[in-house]
Amino acid sequence: MADIDSSAKSTGWRGRFRASKTGTLLANTGFRRLYLARIVNRVGDKLYSIASMWLVYQLTGSTFYTGLAGFLSRLPIVFGFLFGPIVDRSRLSRLLVLVGAAQAIVVVSVPVVARVHTVSVSLVLAVVGLLALLGRLNAPAEKAALPRLVDDELLPRANSLESATHQTIGAVAEALSGALIAVFSAVALFAFDAATFVVSAVFFALLSVPTTEKTGTSPSVTEYLADMREGFELIRNSVVGHMVVAASFVSAFTAGSTAVLPAFADSLGGAETYGLFIAAMTVGLLVGSLVASRFETIRFGRFVIVGFLITAVGQLGIVTVGWLPAVLLCYGIATIPIGIYNVLVSATIQTGVPNDLLARVSSTTGSLVAAVGPLGYLIGGAFGDRYGSATVIGFSAIGYCLLVGYWLVVPALREFPPVTSVEPNSFGT
């Protein structure tokens, strides 16, 4: 009798899971393959991002060069709008496979050179820049693929699930990163990242993404420019444009604090401490991703105003509390609203922007926001050498205050409705 009850409970739990939004998503073969490919990429990227910044700092001992590395990693984003029309007309699964293979070849050059010669900071900086450039193809392609594979009403849950999983895996990778660098060296993590690109390319090869009427067509110069202009026009004529302006305020300050983080962590410990800082950030983003669905029915404008005030206070706490566990706690708390925001804003844009424009809009918004980011890295790195890393990190709180101020004074942002109230394909109409 107990066995029967246990079986019934198990069946009931499985049935409820299959009927849930998460169960429906994971039963979708296309979403599941995209999900797995991005998870594998996430592991490699997290280890690589820490390894590259630490290797640059190790080779030079200067926050200017870590700032330069950040500058190179963000500079290609400024030109991402040039790739949007190409992505929107591409067969997305094929494009993702080709880009993944190219990324593997680029990143494996560091361990290959290390086998026969001393790795130079110039090589690492070149790899950082090339990988960032290739990312301008695969990032909008992944974003454009998701709404073609998932129904509109499931997009918030899909973004939340992906983000939560990415942050969980990222937190584990980052928590181990300092120890892995100490045991195997930063160069070894580059080899691991190359392997993850190959594995994710296999998943992308199995992916079948629905096409649009422009898929597979080759635009003329006139059509290419018209496609690009269409993406800009949607942003300019919708609330997305205001979101871009607001995000730009914080971009430079965030970049500046990221540029000096290795030096700030080094002053408190070393590579292990740097890994803990990145892990604290990822745990905060994870918590935000997990609770994001609870904010779907709350006015998005009100959430941003309150949430990013919390982030600003957390940033100030990082450089004022003095005790490492409390510093890490402040760093994690400061990123929780960012994790919620990332999920909700992705779902908002993917719902409100027509599918055949999504890659152009995603890449263009990324370009506009990133236009000030590279300068933030350079200025942050230079100021870190002169005034200290703690000063730069504390100053970044101003960026979040500017973001809050802009959302307050722009009615379209302040009164922005809940994400669940956004009408499909309603932006730019």
Image (cartoon, helix red, strand yellow):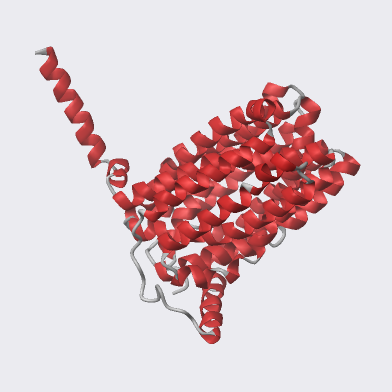
Q: Say which quadrant the C terminus sits in.
A: bottom left
Residue reaching furthest to the front? 116
From the viewer's perspective, is residue 93 above or below residue 322? below
Would you identify the image quadrant in which residue 243 lies?
A: bottom right
Q: Residue at 41% across / 53% down in the picture?
A: 204
Give coordinates of residue 406: x percent, y percent.
Answer: 65, 57
Left or right, 332 with respect to 17, comes to right
Q: Nearer the viewer, residue 251 or 420?
A: 251
Would you identify the image quadrant in which residue 272 lies?
A: top right
For the question of whether residue 21 can be seen, the reply is yes
Residue reaching furthest to the top? 2
From the viewer's perspective, is residue 206 above or below residue 60? below
Give coordinates of residue 288: x percent, y percent.
Answer: 51, 39
Q: How many marks?
A: 0
From the viewer's perspective, is residue 361 above or below residue 45? below
Q: Nearer the viewer, residue 77 or 427?
A: 77
Give coordinates of residue 383: x percent, y percent.
Answer: 86, 46
Give coordinates of residue 118: x percent, y percent.
Answer: 78, 41
Left or right, 239 with respect to 252, comes to left
Residue reaching furthest to the right? 386
Q: Say which quadrant the N terminus sits in.
A: top left
Q: Residue at 56% across / 49% down in the picture?
A: 304
Left or right, 265 with respect to 24, comes to right
For the question of whether residue 313 can be seen, the reply is no
Q: Residue at 75% across / 26% down in the picture?
A: 321
Left or right, 84 with respect to 54, comes to left
